[in-house]
């Protein structure tokens, strides 16, 4: 009887791991494994900023990108996906800040992650995004920011004129939040 009870428990445990109609889908909610940010804005004091990241990638419109080429400018890097509702909500605000700051030497670059290329292109067209984006289907660009990884989507990094990460933002942004941050970093001495 005891052996029969143990065998029944083993069968029931194995059935719980099945892929039937009642099985638990660990990826439920998003095939992209969407991870929301913690809502933080972390400003890194200039004296504590690490070495500049060596971020490179392929632009959505074609061509290559190397963050080192933007040294001397303040660069805002936004990690987004067309499948991400908060990314859609902040797109107009990011474009607004880009338009307000580009004449003062601020550059914006998007990084489209875990997306189909056609979906990414449609996102840029729909939201009239004027700055370039990298196409990063596999999420490799974020891994290049080892000291300050943007581990959520959306995430935004503000890079100072020396190429170092000055601000890490792990949430969706409004223009009134981002604009003063960008202006503050842009006002820093080189």
Image (tube, helix red, strand yellow):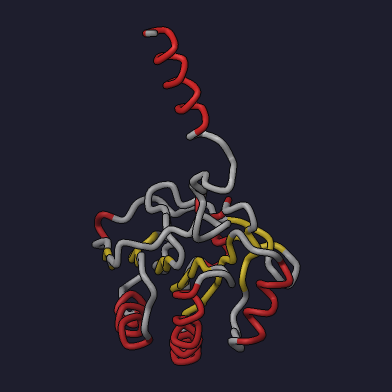
Q: How many marks?
A: 0
Q: Is residue 166 above or below residue 182?
A: above
For image coordinates 24% across by 57% down, the residue present is: 47
**Which of 169/188 is in front?**
169
Depth check, front residue: 3 or 126: 3
Q: Position of residue 90 (x, y in %)?
A: 45, 81
User: Is the C terminus in the top left, top right, bottom left or bottom right quadrant?
Assistant: bottom left
Q: Nearer the viewer, residue 119 or 175?
A: 119
Which corner quadrant holds the N terminus? top left
Residue at figure coordinates x 44%, y 73% from the top left:
74
To which quarter of the image does residue 13 belong?
A: top left
Q: Is residue 103 above or below residue 112?
A: below
Relative to 110, is 122 on the left or the right? right
| x and y, in percent, of residue 156 in the image | 42, 68
Q: 13 and 72: which one is in front?
A: 13
Q: Residue at x 67, y 85 (%)?
A: 125
Name, please, the residue furthest toward the front.
1
Q: Is residue 120 above or below residue 92?
A: above
Q: Position of residue 113 (x, y in %)?
A: 58, 61
Residue for point 46% across, 28% down: 12
In percent of width and height, residue 24 lies at 49, 46
In this picture, is 147 found above or below 116? above
Looking at the image, residue 65 sits to the left or right of residue 84; the answer is right
């Amino acid at each position: 009887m005891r052996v029969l009870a143990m065998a029944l428990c083993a069968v029931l445990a194995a059935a719980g791991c099945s892929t039937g109609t009642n099985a638990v889908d660990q990826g439920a909610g998003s095939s992209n494994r969407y991870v929301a940010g913690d809502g933080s804005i972390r400003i890194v004091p200039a004296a504590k900023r690490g070495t500049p990241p060596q971020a490179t990638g392929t632009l959505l419109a074609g061509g290559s990108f190397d963050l080192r080429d933007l040294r001397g400018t303040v660069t805002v890097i936004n990690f987004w996906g067309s499948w991400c509702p908060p990314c859609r909500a902040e797109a107009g605000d990011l474009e607004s800040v880009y338009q307000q700051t580009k004449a003062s030497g601020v550059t914006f670059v998007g990084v489209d992650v875990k997306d189909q290329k056609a979906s990414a292109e449609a996102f840029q067209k729909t939201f009239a995004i004027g700055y370039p984006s990298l196409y990063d289907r596999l999420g490799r660009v974020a891994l290049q920011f080892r000291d300050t990884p943007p581990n959520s989507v959306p995430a935004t990094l503000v890079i100072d004129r020396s190429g170092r990460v000055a601000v890490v933002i792990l949430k969706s942004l409004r223009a009134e939040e981002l604009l003063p941050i960008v202006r503050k970093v842009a006002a820093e001495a080189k």
